[in-house]
Image: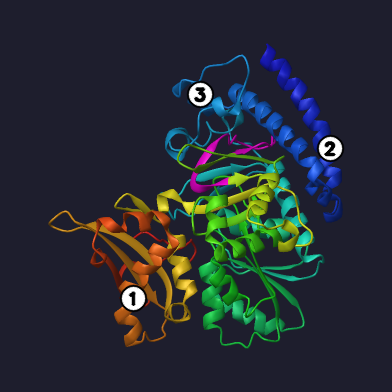
Amino acid sequence: MMDFLYRLYAEAVLEVLAWLRRIASVNGRLYMLLHAPTLQPFLVRTGTMRAHALFLKAKRHCPAYGMFLEAEGYQNNTIWKLTDVPIMTKENYVKRYSLEERCYDGAIPRAGVVIDESSGSTGQPNNWVRSASERNDVKRILQLNYEIIFKDNGKVLLNCFALGPWATGMNVSMSLVDVGILKSIGPDRAKLINTLRLLGPKYDYLIFGYPPFIRSFVDECDLDLSPYHIDFIVGGEGLSEGLRNHLRKYAKSVVSSYGASDLEINIGVETPLTIALRRVCLKEPALCRDIFGRDNPPMIFQYNAVDYIIETNDVGELLFTIGRMSGAAPKIRYNLRDSGGVISFADLTKHLRKHGMELASLVPRTSHFPILFVYGRNDSSVPFYGCKVFPSDIEQILSSEAALMISFGTFQLGVTEDEHLTSHLTIHLEQTGNPVSSALDSSLEDLFFDALIRVNQDFREVSKLFDRRQVHVQIHARETGPFAGRDIRIKNKYIA
């Protein structure tokens, strides 16, 4: 009974707050008020209240969630705490219960619903039900971010994310059709180039896509892009600063957005602050270790604590709770298997001051939203002598050397054992089409070994345990070997 009364009270309070938030979301200037420092504790408290109300609704009205709590042995405590709630994963929740059971009232709503499918880049694709209300929420936030970042309407928006059932591409198109001239192209370089040629440089362009696709577009484009005003929005995987610098030769700005089909797109977005912080951490490894625990800086975003509660588990994986009551299916402490963490704005300020830096020296004006940092999928790394080698490590190495950037487009990692049970790490590189010099070819294994010691602290520690000849580099012609039969509609596969 107390749960029911609290839920009624919380829903009434949250409805008033949601009404006030809708007023603030009328335009970007009003929404920026939420970024003020004095409001951050209030946003966090409101987010916690939303999570509690969502939990009570899911427990009562979502069949899968009720069964999940029972299967995980959840016990009601006198004082509810989100940290006491069991963690959702694909294995213990998504794959265990049907699509209908994971919806409220055990049924897919009959109207206004979209079913998205994940790309399947880490295995079997899964499906997710989105209600009209939650899609409208995502649409509003995307449009606000567009207004805040680009400050005008009327751009030509070229959506090169995968279309069809995949979440990101369709949601981008549905959300941004009202703010500019939209063309949904998909990951097709020829169609993108033809569109730019057709419309010409008289328009401003905003091009969306996965980082490898955007890179292949600028590297292989036979159209002179210098007269064009282009901005890139990328997502789906990490973006190294070296690649950002490379893309900036052709674009005014390159901004990355963080999201997942399991949850929703645009959970976090890069800001001038996060980009500046990442660049400083590349130059200051001690600062990077102090803030993020590693020498190599992660992707860094800012997010709204009203909409998302983001935690980490005991192995540093991110847990997401989406606090909206209007969703078709609850997502409470969902483990995406992304490695990372969160930092409050106040704690970030303390870390910087400890190293003699002020935020004002990075950017003059900034949002006080909390910081989300992401290293990438834990299940997309490979274990080698007790350390984990991440795709982001290889991406940073490739983008730090001009010769490597020119010669190789993408890569895959693999760990094997020989007949003596000795482990070997192999880095597979796909050629771009440009010839690889004999000098570079002969030095690749030493180059990558030394670079992994530089960018991966754990690799540096365990490198004493094995011979450097156990790290191999294999070069493959385009679309051969592990890169044959690639589906360009989904994100690159990085594990061989």
Q: Which residue in the rendered view is the most extreme toward the left?
A: 419
Image location of residue 313, percent across then percent down? 50, 37
Q: Earlier in the sequence, mark 3 or mark 2?
A: 2
Quadrant that contains the N terminus: top right
Left or right relative to 286: residue 455: left
Q: Residue at x 75, y 76 (%)?
A: 204
Model colouring: rainbow
Q: Residue at x 81, y 65 (%)?
A: 151
Q: Secondary structure at mark 1?
A: helix
Question: Is residue 252 shown above or below 266?
Answer: below
In magenta stretch: residue 163? no
Q: Which mark is residue 358?
A: none
Query: Label 1 vs label 3: CA separation?
Result: 51 Å
Q: Which residue is mark 3?
A: 69
Q: Amino acid at mark 1?
A: Leu
Mark 1 vs 3: CB contact within 8 A: no
Asked whether residue 369 appears in the rendered view, the answer is yes
- Specify few, some or many for label 1: CA neighbours under 10 Å numbering under 14, 14-19, or 20 or more: some
As rendered, which of 170 and 468 lies closer to the eye? 468
Image location of residue 476, percent across then percent down? 32, 75
Q: Which mark is residue 19?
A: 2
Q: Which residue is mark 1?
A: 444
Which contiguous range is marked in magenta?
321-341
Q: Which tag is nearer the camera, tag 1 or tag 2?
A: 1
Q: Amino acid at mark 3?
A: Leu
Q: Residue at x 53, y 23 (%)?
A: 66
Q: Secondary structure at mark 2?
A: helix
Q: Which tag is nearer the camera, tag 1 or tag 3?
A: 1
